[in-house]
């Protein structure tokens, strides 16, 4: 029978053998929660995102899709540059690092969004707005970006490449000044199955392989109230200018399962040896956000408070076949634990002219990692101070287009503050004692630009 070397296969015994010691814990961030989607979200440090009538509202607060009756088509680029370090503070077996950089690879996204009014497609005259937002890593070249590994030297918790970002939803007005909306965040749950017979030299036969990906859809709901329009639409009152918004985003994740059955002629008969790996990536906790803003004639000021339920991540990690042991306490080794956090955000915007505005924002986010260390995972993080700045310009008249064109540019700086962690490895005293203590810190620079066509 004809045999083939396993090196010819994308998934095989050699690949699985290489995965076992490395797959473990992927980046637990995502494009929108970690940085922001569009430049306007990045510039305000997401403080204005609940009220943003651009298509990114489909993620932050789908009710805001109804704030502007015009349709829009948005295209943009985002580049996040990381400089994340771990400085050795000594230990029983230190690696003698002096500010060693652990992550300096950028995350780069192509952003595409569309919003439109579906009223003409229905028998009703009531406006119904639909929006879809897509973000693809490597400027569109890598839709399934995924990196997951154990790391004796430590790895940062929330940064790195991001898989496909996809959201779609609806928004409408239910009463004067009151908008509501609902959306779905779509992630992929992939599964690969391999059946093969092999010889000790690596030659295989009777191979069969099946790869599938199932979409997982998690709900997002939101509401926006314009108090002035609700209580005093005909003339100004003290409610005028005030708005309040509320949004809830359910928890979601991307995960991959590799399931293989291997038999070895003369040594391991059918049903053979089963290797099964399940690993998580791009986890987003359940997030509840409430915000308010006041808008004057040429300026606005507002803020938002997020409650992020990270504590449930500990239960999800226990399902991970490699990372699971790190979430279980064993002797003197601490378990990997997480805590819920509250993230305050503030922002302001000033219209220099009728069609040109400057936006700035600031936020503070505690690290959700509660434990000081965990065997082989060695997750690093720190409290973050986030500062954003951006500009937007709208051209109301162009030579060829009937509606305005909007350009946005946003910059964001994230300072990961110093925090100490103990590193554990099964290769050192069975992981019962830390072999090194490190101080994690770093900087992240994010810049994004977009162009929006109204229609």
Image: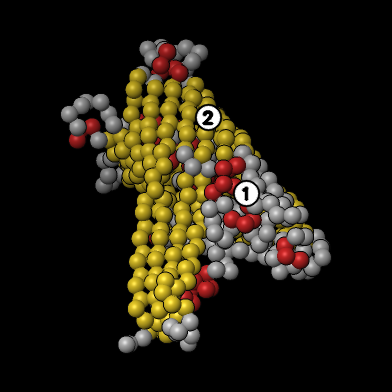
Label 2: element kind: strand
Residue 119 in view of the camera: yes
Which part of the image, by quadrant, shows the N terminus?
bottom left
Residue lying at the far left of the rendered structure: 123
Q: In the rendered view, would you say 413 is above or below 361?
A: below
Measuring 43% from the left and 68% from the top, which residue is drawn there?
260
> At which x and y percent is residue 9?
40, 77
Q: In the rendered view, would you say 99 is above or below 338?
A: below
> At which x and y percent is residue 400?
26, 47
Q: Are marks 2 and 1 in contact (CB under 8 Å)?
A: no
Neighbour class for label 1 at 10 Å: few (<14), some, many (≥20)?
A: many
Neighbour class for label 2 at 10 Å: few (<14), some, many (≥20)?
A: some
Measuring 47% from the left and 46% from the top, which residue is drawn there?
252
**Residue 84 vs residue 337, the one in the foreground:** 337
Measuring 47% from the left and 39% from the top, which residue is drawn there?
250
Measuring 41% from the left and 38% from the top, which residue is drawn there?
219
Residue 451 in view of the camera: no
Residue, disc 1: 414
In the image, 35: left or right of 452?
Answer: right
Distance from label 2 to label 1 (Cα)? Answer: 22 Å
Residue, disc 2: 290
Quarter of the image for residue 325 reads bottom right
**Residue 360 vs residue 304, the one in the foreground:** 304
């Amino acid at each position: 029978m004809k045999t083939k070397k396993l090196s010819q296969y994308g998934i095989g015994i050699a690949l699985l053998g290489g995965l076992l010691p490395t797959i473990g814990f992927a980046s637990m961030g995502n494009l929108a929660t970690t940085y922001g989607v569009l430049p306007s979200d990045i510039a305000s440090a997401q403080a204005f995102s609940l009220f943003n009538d651009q298509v990114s509202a489909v993620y932050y607060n789908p009710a805001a899709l109804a704030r502007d009756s015009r349709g829009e088509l948005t295209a943009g680029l985002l580049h996040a540059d990381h400089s994340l370090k771990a400085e050795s503070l000594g230990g029983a077996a230190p690696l003698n690092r002096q500010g060693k950089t652990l992550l300096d690879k950028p995350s780069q996204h192509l952003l595409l969004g569309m919003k439109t009014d579906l009223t003409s497609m229905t028998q009703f005259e009531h406006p119904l707005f639909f929006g879809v937002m897509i973000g693809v890593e490597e400027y569109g070249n890598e839709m399934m970006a995924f990196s997951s590994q154990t790391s004796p030297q430590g790895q940062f918790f929330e940064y790195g490449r991001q898989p496909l970002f996809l959201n779609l939803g609806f928004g409408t007005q239910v009463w004067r000044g009151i908008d509501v909306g609902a959306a779905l965040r779509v992630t992929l749950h992939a599964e690969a199955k391999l059946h093969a017979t092999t010889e000790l030299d690596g030659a295989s036969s009777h191979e069969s392989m099946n790869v599938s990906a199932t979409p997982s859809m998690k709900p997002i709901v939101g509401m926006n109230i314009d108090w002035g329009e609700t209580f005093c639409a005909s003339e100004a009152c003290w409610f005028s200018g005030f708005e309040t918004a509320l949004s809830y985003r359910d928890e979601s994740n991307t995960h991959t399962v590799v399931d293989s059955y291997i038999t070895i002629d003369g040594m391991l008969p059918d049903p053979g040896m089963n290797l099964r790996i399940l690993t998580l990536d791009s986890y987003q906790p359940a997030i509840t956000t409430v915000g308010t803003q006041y808008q004057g004639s040429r300026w606005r000021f507002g803020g938002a408070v997020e409650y992020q339920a990270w504590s449930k991540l500990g239960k999800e990690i226990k399902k991970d076949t490699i990372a699971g042991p790190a979430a279980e306490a064993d002797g003197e080794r601490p378990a990997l634990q997480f805590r819920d956090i509250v993230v305050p955000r503030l922002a302001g915007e000033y219209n220099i002219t009728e069609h040109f505005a400057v936006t700035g924002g600031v936020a503070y986010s505690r690290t959700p990692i509660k434990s000081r260390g965990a065997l082989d995972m060695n997750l690093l993080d720190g409290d973050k101070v986030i500062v954003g700045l951006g500009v937007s310009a709208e051209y109301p008249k162009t030579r060829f287009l009937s509606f305005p064109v909007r350009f946005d540019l946003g910059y964001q700086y994230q300072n990961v503050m110093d925090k100490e962690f103990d590193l554990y490895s099964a290769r050192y005293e069975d992981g019962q004692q830390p072999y090194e203590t490190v101080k994690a810190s770093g900087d992240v620079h994010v810049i994004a630009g977009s162009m929006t066509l109204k229609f």
